[in-house]
Image (cartoon, rainbow, N blue to C red):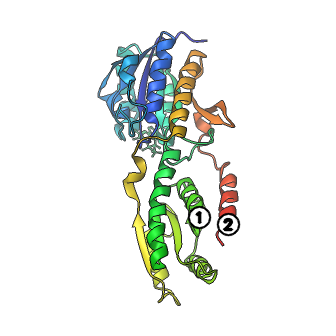
Amino acid sequence: MSDISRIALLTSGGDAPGMNAAVRAVVRSADAKGIETIAVSNGYQGMIENNMRLMDAREVSGILHLGGTILGTARSDAFRTPEGRAKAADNLNAQGVDGIVIIGGDGSLTGGQKLAEEHNFHVIGIPGTIDNDLSGTDFTIGFDTAVNTAMEAIDKIRDTASSHHRTFFVEVMGRHAGWLALYAGISTGATAALIPEREDDIAHIRERIFESFKLNKRFSIIVVAEGENLGGAEAIAEMVKNGEGTENLDIRVANLGHMQRGGSPSMRDRVLGARLGDAAVQALVDGKTGVMVGERYHQIVHTPFTRLKTTERNADMFDLVEMMDRLAR
Ligand code: ATP
């Protein structure tokens, strides 16, 4: 057990729907345990600029359904330096902070690890990213909403693709991770999902499209993660067009862009945010530090920051890719 009395709370990196549910849960759970919360604005940049203030349980009313993060978020180059982190630590010490909860992705939690090591704070991470690219949790906060947004958009594209017998390359977010593309593809019955974790080649993609038309499909949709190895949806569409036998293909590209980050969080992201926010405060009370709280098989688990970026989940991902291939016929 620890005697934490004041914690700092921030959201960092890319925003993700459901972060507000986690913010609310941390503030309320801390309040219930007699712990005060200092809300830091705009991620680590706010920590360095001393942009923080006490936040009480009433101030987090009415935010559960809001997308984005009420705390604001930012990417901070200054925090990547030891001097920047020392400045942040000075400001936290001046506020009497002894524990920190960071809601963010892999980079944000790595920053948290450094703060814990260099300045002796108790630090707990909460996985908040639409990328779903962290080990130690089945899903990250924001992923479910982002997939639903992509799915609904692709459903609409499907209507026009089907009417005009078109081939669509739809680019979704995911610079380093293909989970969003894969789930969006599976949930819309796409012909294929092209993901950064797997090498693709144009000849194979072209073959998949021909096969799909041979099977009497009236259209084809290929979901492309922005970080896949061939250079994105525009580049792939161009390369496919320039190949043999594609004169009759009516190829179009749609990029779903930032809409995937926004919108009211889904039930899953709200519940996950609530659960992980509550668990983060409990972890601090239990004396834990340097770990991310996650949910696996419905249980709360704690994973050291050093073990968040593993490829262990890629096997599950490749199983899903194979399943998608089997079903796309
Ligand atoms: P997302 O998954 O949405 O991209 P992320 O948390 O991975 O979120 P990053 O831009 O990688 O987003 O990191 C957010 C911030 O965390 C950075 O701007 C920086 O301030 C801090 N950070 C990231 N990596 C490190 C690091 N290696 N050392 C110190 N701080 C870091």
Question: Going 36% across and 15% down the picture, which residue do you hit?
Answer: 95
Q: In the image, residue 75 lies at what x, y percent?
A: 37, 41
User: In the rendered view of the protein, which quadrant contains the N terminus?
Assistant: top right
**Residue 288 image-quadrant placement:** top right
Question: Going 60% across and 60% down the picture, which residue do you hit?
Answer: 186
- At label 2, which amino acid type do we have? Leu
**Residue 97 image-quadrant placement:** top left
Q: CA distance from mark 1 to mark 2?
A: 8 Å
User: Callout 1: 10 Å neighbours few (<14), some, many (20+)?
Assistant: many
Q: Is residue 259 visible?
A: yes
The relative height of residue 306 versus residue 282 in the rendered view (above or below) is below
Q: Secondary structure at mark 2?
A: helix
- Mark 1 touching mark 2, by CB under 8 A? yes
Task: State the residue in front, 23 or 306.
Answer: 23
User: In the rendered view of the protein, which quadrant contains the C terminus?
Assistant: bottom right
Q: In the image, residue 59 lies at what x, y percent?
A: 35, 21
All told, the count of numbered labels is: 2
Q: Secondary structure at mark 1?
A: loop
Task: State the residue in front, 233 or 64.
Answer: 64
Task: State the residue in front, 272 or 134.
Answer: 272
Return the residue at label 2: 327
> Which disc, if any, is residue 225?
none
Q: Is residue 288 left or right of residue 46?
A: right
Tell which circle, 1 or 2, labels the residue nearer the N-terminal end: 1
- At label 1, which amino acid type do we have? Gly
The answer to whether the beta carbon of the residue marked 1 is less than 8 Å from any atom of ligand 1 is: no
The relative height of residue 134 versus residue 27 in the rendered view (above or below) is below
Q: Quadrant of ligand 1?
A: top left
Return the residue at label 1: 189
Q: In the image, residue 45 lies at what x, y percent?
A: 33, 34
Question: Going 45% across and 35% down the picture, which residue do you hit?
Answer: 19
